[in-house]
Image (cartoon, grey):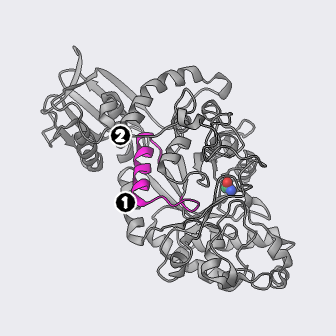
Amino acid sequence: MRCGVLFDEDTRLWAAPGTEGTERWLRSVLGAALGLPLPAGPEDARDSVRLQLDDSLEPEAYRLSVIANWGVEIRGGDPAGVFWGAQTLRQLLGPEAFRRAPVRPGMRYGIPHQIIEDAPRFPWRGLMLDVSRHFMPKEGVLRYLDLMAAHKLNVFHFHLTDDQGWRIEIRRHPRLTEVGSWRARTKFGHRASPLWEEKPHGGYYTQDDIREIVAYAAERHITVVPEIDVPGHSQAAIAAYPELGNTDVIDTASLTVWDSWGISPNVLAPTDNTLRFYEGVFEEVLELFPSEFIHVGGDECLKDQWRASPAARARIEELGLADEDELQSWFIGHFAKWLSARGRRLIGWDEILEGGIAEGAAVSSWRGYGGGIAAARAGHDVVMCPEQHVYLDHRQADGEDEPVPIGYVRTLEDVYRFEPVPPGLDESGARRILGAQANVWTEVMEDHARVDYQAFPRLAAFAEVAWSALPAPPERDFAGFERRMTTHYRRLDALGVAYRPPAGPLPWQRRPGVPGRPIDGPPPNR
Ligand code: ACM
């Protein structure tokens, strides 16, 4: 390399105050990958890497300068900006910089002379992981955070509770994990399938595990937004504490953690006891998660038990509400006020608009754009995550070899053509779009290799949409994205990501009769 900067044994790091986190990350991650010590050195050392804050830059923005005979400088509008600049530096160093140990010890890595100015389009670049349907042990979650950081994603939406498992230790309610974190067996494939896998499945994170995950994320400038789902998707909690359910409608004491997929009819009873119980849950959640937003779910709450319940009917009358939709609004509204009194903000799936949305609440718009548009027009903040584009549990291709039995097809191109700000929103509505999020529901992903297959390469397309100000979807250069992916696949290889091969299914998927072939039945899976 004639003109540029060499990374080798002599490369030193100089970090101005406020950038020490990125210095640590560079030394431990990049140093380990390339086999270089990257010791601290003076600011004027030749070919060193200098990190500093620059308040002329926007939050999360960075300028990366690679100057021959001088070195590398990353200036960030804030510590996060410096960190995102370091991610770009790793990309420039080539795929080997994505490994955990050197494959060519003693190698000198050159970076060509250049200046990159870069900034994110959105402050919320989210990725959700459902650890209820299949538990992902802590190591897998930490790896997921590393993959997020490599793609400059900064909000980890942690779906911790659902009908099929409760995954977070709550000290004052120990049965939530003692009972609620394990199920006896698991529906195999599509919810219409007649098969179960007859082995117990479960696990949970202790409070120290959660602290570790939150701190690991923070070091990578990722905020963890926990989701505790109410009042639907709560069968695991009711199995642990039957008094939380509609005891005047069904025998909740006989409920178990759900072993099937779909939407459970077993929802929380709208009683004072339930509110006090969940206030206790949220008190511990607030101690663990510093995030401004706390996600309370609110989606897919079937109202049949409330309709059949004399106690729920009495509650509707006592509160002067019109119907069960308003009862759900009252329930969510209670927690919106409760959280705001503690300096936090409630976010929920777009069903929280039905029956009236609580003041100050934000919306995750998943059933298309409609909910998000309505919420933004009403002055609420919105995270766009429409299932038509960014549900990564949906199949990536048509073809019976695809190992995922969810009927919808969302191709790499569908994800790349996702536009988080829908046309039709005026400027003040558009300002309400905090950003975008991809969601990984795990009914059909039993381990992190399957999560990788579903998430990649589509997550790379999503990350580009969430970060970059791309042209409107019809003008987006998908062919250009695909060309750039040829380089990115080499990085994913080095990271050990089990992505879906771009050319189609692997040979083992073509064998007839392998488990996981799509099972006839009504899509979608949920
Ligand atoms: C959802 O997919 N039920 C939010």
| The magenta stretch spans residue 141 | yes
What amino acid type is highlighted by mark number 1?
A: Ala
Magenta segment range? 131-154
Q: Can you tell which quarter of the image residue 272 is in?
A: bottom right
User: Where's the N terminus, which quadrant?
Assistant: top left
What amino acid type is highlighted by mark number 2?
A: Gly
Q: Residues within 10 Å of mark 1 (few under 14, many from 20)?
A: some
Instruction: Please name whichever residue, 68 or 503, is drawn nearer the observer in this view of the structure.
Output: 503
Residue 248 horizontal/vertical position (percent): 79, 85
The residue where tag 1 is placed is 215
| The magenta stretch spans residue 479 | no
The residue where tag 2 is placed is 76
Residue at the image position 42 percent from the left and 71 percent from the top: 206
Instruction: Please name whichever residue, 495 or 373, is drawn nearer the observer in this view of the structure.
Output: 495
Residue 151 left/right relative to 247: left
Residue 67 left/right relative to 274: left
Residue 15 horizontal/vertical position (percent): 22, 43
Q: CA distance from mark 2 to mark 1?
A: 21 Å
